[in-house]
Amino acid sequence: MPDKDYQARHEDIERAMDDLWPRVAQSNVQVVDDFVNAKRGRVRLSGVLLTFIVEVECVDGKLWAHLSVSTLKRTPNWDELRWCKEYFLGDRRAIQILPPRAEYVNLHPHVLHLYAPLEHEPLPDFRGVDSTGRLAI
C-alpha cells in the first residue's frame, strides 16, 4: 500500500523526478525501467558496469532523492559514487547514512546509497576554518 505522504504529494514527486533527471543522457547511461518516481538502469564507467536506481521519496512530508549504486562483484569506489552523484543528483548536498546494525536493510552485498534533500537542508554546514583561516572539513 502506498505511503500516505506519497499519495498526498504525487504531483510534487513526479515534478521533482522530472526536474532531477538529466535532460541530455550520456551514451554510457542506459535506463532499463522508467517509473513516475524512479528510474533504474546501468552506467559504464572506465569499463565497470554499475547498476543505479534514482528515485524521489516523500519522508515525513519532505521530498528526498535516493540514489543506489552497485556492481556485481564489489562495492562502488569513491570516484564511481561521486560520478553517479554528480550526474543523477547534480550539484547538491547528498548524504550517506550509516545506521545502527539493528536498522540495516541489505538487499545487495555491494550497494551504496545516497540521499539528497530536495526541499530543505536538514544538516548544518560542517565546514570549519583551519589554522590559516581557510574553510575545511
Image (cartoon, grey):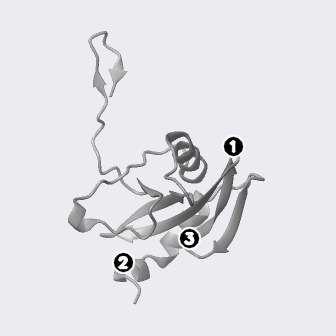
**16 with respect to 32 (left or right):** left
Where the C terminus falls, by quadrant? Answer: top left
Image height of 114 relative to 6, above or below: above
* Disc 2: CA contacts within 10 A as few (<14), some (14-19) or many (>=20): some
Please give left or right for residue 122 compared with residue 30 in the image.
left
Left or right: 133 in relation to 38 = left
Circles 1, 2 touching at the beta carbon (< 8 Å): no
Residue occupying image coordinates x 46% and y 61%: 66
Q: Amino acid at mark 3?
A: Ala
Whichever of labels 1 and 2 marks the residue nearer the N terminus, that label is 2
Identified by mark 2, the residue type is Asp
Q: Label 3's element? A: strand
x, y percentage for residue 97? 33, 54
Quadrant where the N terminus sits is bottom left
The nearer-to-camera label among 3 and 1 is 1
Q: Quadrant of residue 116?
A: bottom left
- In this figure, which residue is indicated by the disc labeled 3? 38
- Name the residue tied to disc 2: 5
Give x and y (percent) for residue 84.
57, 50
| Alpha-carbon span between mark 3 and mark 2 | 16 Å
User: SS of the residue at dot 2?
Assistant: helix
Q: Secondary structure at mark 1?
A: loop
- Distance between the Cα atoms at labels 1 and 2? 39 Å
The mark closer to the camera, 3 or 2, is 3
Q: Residue at x 28, y 20 (%)?
A: 129
Q: Amino acid at mark 1?
A: Ser
Q: Marks 3 and 1, Cα distance to the nearest angstrom?
A: 25 Å
- Residue 22: horizontal and vertical position, in percent? 66, 55
Q: Is residue 117 visible?
A: no
- Judging by the rendered image, the residue that carries numbered circle 1 is 46
Query: In the rendered structure, which disc, 3 or 2, sits on the residue that comes first in sequence?
Result: 2
